[in-house]
Amino acid sequence: MVIGPDVAIGKGCKIQNNVSVYKGVTLKDGVFCGPSMVFTNIYNPRAEIRKMDQVRPTLVKHGATLGANCTIVCGTTIGRYVFVGAGAVVTRNVPDHALMLGNPARRVGWMCQCGERLTDDLDCLACEKAYSKEEEGLKEISGQDQQD
C-alpha cells in the first residue's frame, strides 16, 4: 500500500493489498478499496514531462465500495454507497447508490446502504429499506441515510 501526499482518508476505511492512494484523492468515512484497485491523478501522464501541477482531484464519498482491480480515472466523484464492480473503469462521476460495472463503467442497478442490490422498485429485500430517485442518485425514504 502506498499513501501519497495531499491525501485524505476518513475513519473506518479499508484499503486492501496493492492499492496506491495518490495525491489528490479524498476518501470519506467507510470507503472500501478492494485488492489492486487503481486511482489515477494525472489525466494524460508522460514519463519525460513533469505534470504534478495538473493533478485532478478524486472524491470518494461515504460508504462507497471500489472492487478488486477497478480503475478510478482522476477528476471523478464517486457517490455515497456506490458499488464499483471488480475490473470496472470509472471515467465519469457516479451518483449515490449506483452499481457500476464494465469498461467504461455503466450503471446497471442500484445498491442499498447495507451492500445488497435493490429491486427494480428500489427496495432492499435484506434490510427492508426503500429509496426514491433524486438528481444525485437515490435517497432513502424509510429511515435515515447518512449525509456526506
Image: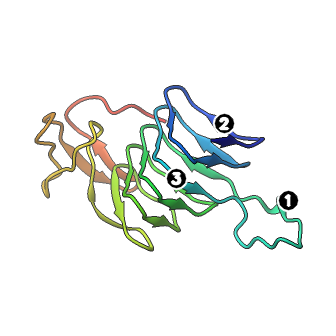
Picture quadrant of residue 135? bottom left
Residue ranking furthest to the top:
11
Residue contact between numbered discs 1 and 3, judged by CB atoms under 8 Å: no
* Residue at 49% in and 52% down: 78
Graded by Cα atoms within 10 Å as few (under 14), some (14 to 19) or many (20 or more), the crowding at tag 1 reads few
Q: Quadrant of the N terminus?
A: top right
Q: Residues within 10 Å of mark 3 (few under 14, many from 20)?
A: many
Residue at the spot 50% in from the left edge and 40% down from the top edge = 16
**Image location (x, y in percent) of residue 140:** 27, 39
* Residue topped by disc 2: 8
Horizontal and vertical percent for residue 48?
89, 73
Q: Which mark is residue 53?
A: 1
Q: Say what secondary structure mark 3 lies in.
A: loop
Q: How far is disc 1 from disc 3 in space, using C-alphas?
A: 26 Å
Q: Are marks 2 and 1 in contact (CB under 8 Å)?
A: no
Where is 84 relative to 144, above or below? below
Q: How is the image coloured?
A: rainbow
Q: Position of residue 70 (x, y in %)?
A: 47, 59
Residue annotated with mark 3: 36
